[in-house]
């Protein structure tokens, strides 16, 4: 499992390192956004340090804040909640590409019904109980984004997320890639 994690980290880092070189048109200076313009972005995000679900991002003077949330209810559970908060800065802006760094946290609360059976092949349930889990992930990330037509944004990022299961302790430290897709104005 760790082998695939290292491969994904190397791939994302190589892309992040090469983008500034390809983002420039010849030897011209990069086109920086007007720092007085406040940008809004709404969309969807999925990641360890941004949370999962609908997202809003506000950007001013290269600094940005992002919130995400998604409540989910299923037949087998009383409800699940995913949310997150991220604060960051755009480090490099070149034409339609940008590179940013952020510090974020994501929260996942799950409510599952866990049942035990008479035997592994038996369809008869012995007992069922509710199992609640609460996870908090936090850490820094570096991301690269592309804007199409001044309005559509795609950002991929790689965090180093420290994951805690609340009430239990440290669960893992993972480099798990994430993505944000949005519309900005």
Image (cartoon, grey):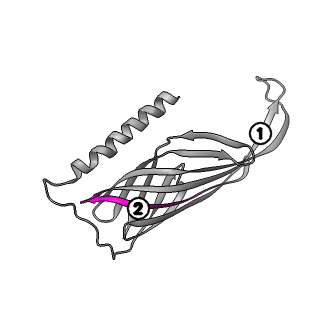
Q: Position of residue 57 (x, y in %)?
A: 46, 65
Question: Considering depth in this image, is 152 or 90 the residue closer to the camera?
Answer: 90
Residue sitting at 26 percent across and 66 percent down? 32
Query: Which image quadrant is residue 82 in?
Result: bottom right
As for residue 6 lying within the magenta part, the answer is no
Residue sitting at 50 percent across and 62 percent down? 55
Q: Residues within 10 Å of mark 1 (few under 14, many from 20)?
A: few
Q: Secondary structure at mark 1?
A: strand
Q: Is residue 13 above or below residue 84?
A: above
Res 89 label: 2
Q: Is residue 145 above or below residue 40?
A: above
For the C terminus, the quadrant is: bottom left
Q: Is residue 60 above or below residue 99?
A: below
As for residue 92 lying within the magenta part, the answer is yes
The residue identified by callout 1 is: 114
Distance from label 2 to label 1 (Cα)? 42 Å
Res 69 label: none
Residues drawn in magenta: 81-98
Residue sitting at 45 percent across and 61 percent down? 88
Looking at the magenta stretch, what is its main secondary structure?
strand
Question: Considering depth in this image, is 55 or 34 the residue closer to the camera?
Answer: 34
Q: Position of residue 115 (x, y in %)?
A: 79, 36
Query: Which image quadrant is residue 51 in?
Result: bottom right
Q: Position of residue 123 (x, y in %)?
A: 79, 29
Q: Residues within 10 Å of mark 2 (few under 14, many from 20)?
A: some
**In the picture provided, is 31 more to the left or to the right than 61?**
left
Q: Secondary structure at mark 2?
A: strand
Q: Residue furthest right?
A: 126
């Amino acid at each position: 499992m760790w082998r695939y994690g290292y491969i994904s980290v190397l791939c994302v880092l190589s892309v992040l390192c090469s983008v500034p070189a390809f983002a420039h048109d010849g030897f011209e200076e990069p086109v920086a956004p007007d720092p007085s313009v406040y940008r809004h972005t709404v969309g969807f995000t999925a990641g360890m340090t941004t949370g999962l679900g609908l997202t809003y991002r506000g950007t001013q003077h290269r600094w940005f804040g992002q919130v995400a949330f998604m409540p989910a209810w299923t037949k087998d559970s009383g409800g699940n909640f995913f949310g997150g908060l991220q604060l960051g800065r755009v480090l490099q802006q070149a034409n339609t590409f940008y590179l940013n760094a952020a510090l974020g946290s994501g929260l996942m609360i799950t409510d599952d019904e866990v049942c035990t059976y008479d035997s592994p092949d038996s369809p008869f349930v012995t007992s069922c109980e509710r199992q609640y889990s609460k996870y908090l992930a936090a850490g820094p990330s570096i991301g690269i984004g592309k804007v199409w037509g001044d309005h559509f944004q795609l950002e991929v990022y790689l965090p180093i997320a420290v994951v805690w299961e609340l009430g239990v302790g440290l669960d893992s430290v993972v480099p798990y890639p994430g993505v944000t897709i949005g519309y900005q104005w």
